[in-house]
Amino acid sequence: MNIQIRHISGRASGFLLLVGLLGLIWGLQVTPAQTAPEDISDWEGTAPGALFSTPGNNNAISPAIDYSPDGAVLAGAYLQYTGSFFTPYIRISTNDGTSWSAPTAISPSSTTNATWVDVTLDNNNKVHVVWLENATLGQPSTVYYTNNIAGSWLTPQVLVQTTSVFQAAVVAPRIIASPGNKLDVVWSQVYPDTQPQLNIMHRRSNNNGSSWGVLNPVAITNPNSFNPIVAVSADGKIHVVWEEVEVVPPNLDYGRIRYAQGVVSGSGTTPSWNYNPNNPINIAHSSIDQAARPTIAAIGNKLYVAYNNRDGGEEAQEIWIATCTVNCTSAANWISHPLNPISGAPIGANTQDPFYVIPVFIVYDNCLATYYHGTDGNASHPTEVIFGVNSCTGWGGHLDRATEFNTRATYPRVTSDGDWIQLLYEVRDYPQTGDIQIYYRRRLVPDVLLALPLNRR
């Protein structure tokens, strides 16, 4: 393995540099840093940050943000309330967030309420967006896709449309671009629509969204399956994790983190999924009964999965992490990190929406970082703020706080080009009107002792 020293902190002593050189090699960790949390002033501007959504009293929800692989283009998406319904908007920056394009409605003719949006960028710096409309009981739920490859927004394409009399028919579509003009989208769906359970679905495009493969079930499960997220490793395999409710008599509910691996043959678009419903893989540690809200990162061919341990309920949640290097379809090869919980002391979430502390991943230099919202247990800090932890400072040994305790911040989404950390999030009850708005902040990545050449995702 070739190791490149790209960035050595001026604050690092010779001893720490030696520790970094010996210990921060792929897959190994140093002892947690015995340092105080970073000052919030590392984040540019005055908290809570810059208003990203449209000014006024119209709510905005569901932030999403991504860099292009070369870091040249940054795109942020969200859902803006237009007076009758939410619709997806996009803003683009070509200077690392110093300035942004005006908000653009990417589905201006829509008259149906949107409930979720996600964004990704390809190797050609083009933006791809998926969103969900009208996820309501008994009404059609539709996953749409569009891009700006031709210089304007493509007429939205329907990836799936279905109706369920049992519950909202579709939940939480996510999209990711990978080399070779490939796009992968996953979501939860009532499938088949004659039964009440949500299952995990997938569609792939091999030509940057010009056409799509058939609707492809990742996993048909008996309990409900929620909140899938997808990653593609360097070898081209597709990796999906999700949370699943497991019902054990007499009426006991358990939360599991499931995993499936997809392999596509040649130029095909329909993966063969390695998933056994009779013996599914549980990524969460065996001691955890209520695991939820996973996120996944593929660094080369090594997989990282972070998730919420909610055994303590709303007021005592933790972020845990598991890794797998080879043969990840075997449960024995998923290793729980020795520094779990990586979030340190338990954190809380409001007893109303969003209920859960939700982790998201970014990679910068040789560091893997996880950001999430939560309360810190201090009685004088009753609202959620945005926290971050990373592998290079020993996970929970060093917190990066991005927002102030006097403003409720939730649902962070982050991305990095290796130089900047870019953050979008919801600010709730601001300014004390009951509104939800999308805010933006950025900061330079923390000083890192040692860096390996990683893909900028």
Image (spheres, rainbow, N blue to C red):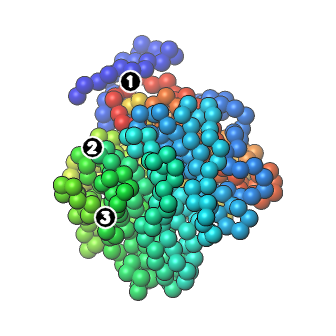
Say which amino acid is labelled 1. Answer: Leu
Say which amino acid is labelled 2. Answer: Ala
Of labels 1 and 2, the one closer to you: 2
Label of residue 450 in the image: 1
Tell which circle, 3 or 1, labels the residue nearer the N-terminal end: 3
Label 3, residues with CA under 10 Å away: few <14, some 14-19, many ≥20: some
Q: Which quadrant would the N terminus be assigned to in this image?
A: top left
Tell which circle, 3 or 2, labels the residue nearer the N-terminal end: 3
- Percent of width and height locating residue 69: 40, 38
Helix, strand or loop under label 3: loop
**Residue at (46% x, 60% y) in the render:** 145
**Residue at (33% x, 41% y) in the render:** 299
Tell whether label 1 touches label 3 (CB within 8 Å).
no
Q: Nearer the viewer, residue 399 or 209?
A: 209
Question: In the rendered view, would you say 427 is above or below 30?
Answer: below
- Percent of width and height locating residue 231: 36, 51
- Horizontal side, residue 71 vs residue 286: left or right: right
Helix, strand or loop under label 2: loop
Label 2, residues with CA under 10 Å away: few <14, some 14-19, many ≥20: some
- Disc 3 from disc 1: Cα separation: 41 Å
Tell which circle, 1 or 2, labels the residue nearer the N-terminal end: 2
- For label 2, the residue is 234
Q: Which quadrant would the C terminus be assigned to in this image?
A: top left
Say which amino acid is labelled 3. Answer: Gly
Label of residue 432 in the image: none
Q: Quadrant of residue 117?
A: bottom right
Q: Nearer the viewer, residue 90 or 174?
A: 90
Question: In the rendered view, would you say 266 is above or below 255?
Answer: above
- Disc 3 from disc 2: Cα separation: 21 Å
- For label 3, the residue is 213
